[in-house]
Amino acid sequence: MNTLKTTFLLALLTVLLVVAGGAIGGEGGMLFALVLAGAMNFVSYWFSDKIVLAMYGAKEVTESESPEFFNLVRQLAARAGLPMPRVYLIPSDTPNAFATGRNPEHAAVAATRGILRILTREELMGVMAHELSHVKHRDILISTIAATVAGAITYLAHMAQWAAIFGGGGRDRDGEGGGILGMLVMVIVAPLAALLIQMAISRSREYDADRGGAEVSGNPLYLAGALRKLEAANRRLPMQEATPASAHMFIVNPLAGGGLMSLFSTHPPMEERVRRLESMVYGNRP
């Protein structure tokens, strides 16, 4: 069901992109939007892993450099029936982790220095099993495409804003584009809609990865305990180098923010994630 939902949301995101292009430049704008999305997805597919790893200063480690962590990942990958991914360490004291790569044969998992310090071996197993579940179900590629198309929509919104400022909205007199009303809708509504769709995609994939990670690690409580620790630690020490464009990749939101901003988080509510994991062990207790 989640796969069908994700496919529908990705299609909706693409339609929104095309409509956004049409609001700016009519048929020409729609074609431009499709070409832009195609180019961005091409770059994302082939180079997104290298880009995001470099962004966070991640360093690939070998078994001799980090034997305990490396062997833990290898053990979990074998349980999940996956090829051994590349293993990276991020020089950050904020505890967090993510997976990247276009498919299981070209995947990488990365953990911060901080997460290795605060989690027990069992909790770390839960976290890395979660990331490997993302790899197994190709969630990385899905989230990358979603983020790329959402980024393209935001880019077009900025173009629409400048076009409106400099009189681009007057084209409705010639029957082209969407006119000033279309411009306003584009600037205000389209980026918000893109964010909500991207959020829905990311949240559904996180729940699936939690369940898959719990099954691979052998105990849902490993991940539940880790999530509690990571949520508290990231509230105290947000990752300074994290960006909204890549925040969805991490197992918990690395950005500071609560209240209204939490409603627009790409991550599901932590209480619900923990509740679902615990229900795998205890059932739905009152």
Image: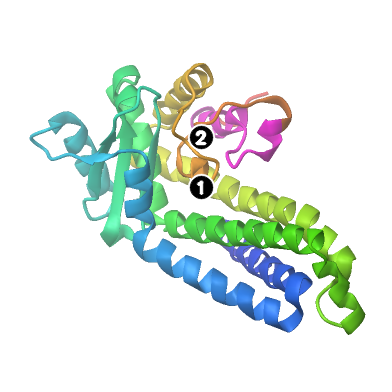
Q: Residue at x 29, y 39 (%)?
A: 58
Residue 186: image quadrant is bottom right
Q: How would you rate the neighbour count of disc 2 (Cα within 10 Å): few for under 14, some for 14-19, many for 20 or more?
A: some
Give the mark, 2 or 1, whose residue is nearer the N terminus. 1
Relative to 17, residue 250 above or below:
above
> Which secondary structure type mostly characterizes the magenta part of the structure?
helix
Q: Residue at x 36, y 39 (%)?
A: 56
Q: Amino acid at mark 2?
A: Met
Give the CA separation, mark 2 to mark 1. Answer: 13 Å
Name the residue nearer the viewer: 58 or 145.
58
Residue 215: image quadrant is top left
Q: Can residue 241 be seen by looking at this rendering? A: yes
Res. 225 mark: none
Residue hosting label 1: 208
Q: Secondary structure at mark 2?
A: helix
Which residues fall within the magenta stretch? 261-282
In the image, residue 76 lies at what x, y percent?
A: 26, 42
User: Any magenta on residue 207?
Assistant: no
Q: How would you rate the neighbour count of disc 1 (Cα within 10 Å): few for under 14, some for 14-19, many for 20 or more?
A: some
